[in-house]
Amino acid sequence: MKQSFTELIIQSNTENLCRVEQFVDDVCETYYITNSYYGNILVAVLEAVRNAVVHGNGNNQEKTVALSFKRLPNGLCFTVTDEGNGFDFMSVPNPLDIADGNNENTGNGIFLMRSLADQISYNKKGNKVEIVFYISSINQETTLNRITQIHKYFNKQKSMA
């Protein structure tokens, strides 16, 4: 798979997430991504595809989700596109800012994606997300910041349980 761009198209069914996992595995193996960073990539990409299947395409198996990959000079870029109407990504709240007990539609998946990736951007319509991982930028400060954000998230979830 040592090419600069590749794509996987799946039907909108969460059972196809295993194909997405294999796609990410292949990319990470090709580019010698370490185990610690592999987890960030896998969780963020799986969450983006799951959001596209469930929220974007409404689990409509007649619609597809496209996952593409391209190698950047300083990292990896995954793009997920669904056939849905899109959404206003700017209006999705940060789950850490939401009052306890009011956790419906809180953007947990988007929060995780933003916490694990170096850059997340949506198209204007909101049915296409680009997830970038700057592999050369991974350092102790970045890693510790990500771990802190994830711990805050899970501690908030525990306190609400």
Image (cartoon, helix red, strand yellow):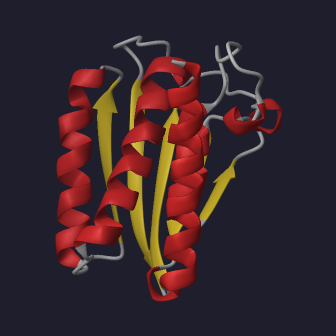
**Number of marks in the image?**
0
Q: From the viewer's perspective, is 41 left or right of 154?
A: left
The correct choice, above or below, for 49 with respect to 2 in the image is above
Residue 127: image x %, image y %? 62, 34
Closer to the camera in the image, 52 or 8: 52
Q: Is residue 64 visible?
A: yes
The residue lying at 17 percent from left, 50 percent from top is 22
Locate residue 62: give its quadrant: top left
Q: From the viewer's perspective, is 151 left or right of 87?
A: left
The residue lying at 82 percent from left, 31 percent from top is 91
Locate residue 49: give its quadrant: top left
Residue 139: image x %, image y %? 49, 86
The correct choice, above or below, for 29 with respect to 110 in the image is below
Closer to the camera in the image, 105 or 161: 161
Residue 12: image x %, image y %? 36, 22
Q: Is residue 117 visible?
A: no
Residue 136: image x %, image y %? 47, 88
The residue lying at 60 percent from left, 53 percent from top is 114
Residue found farthest to the right: 91
The residue lying at 53 percent from left, 36 percent from top is 109
The correct choice, above or below, for 53 with respect to 69 in the image is above
Locate residue 26: give its quadrant: bottom left
Which quadrant holds the N terminus? bottom left
Closer to the camera in the image, 82 or 112: 112
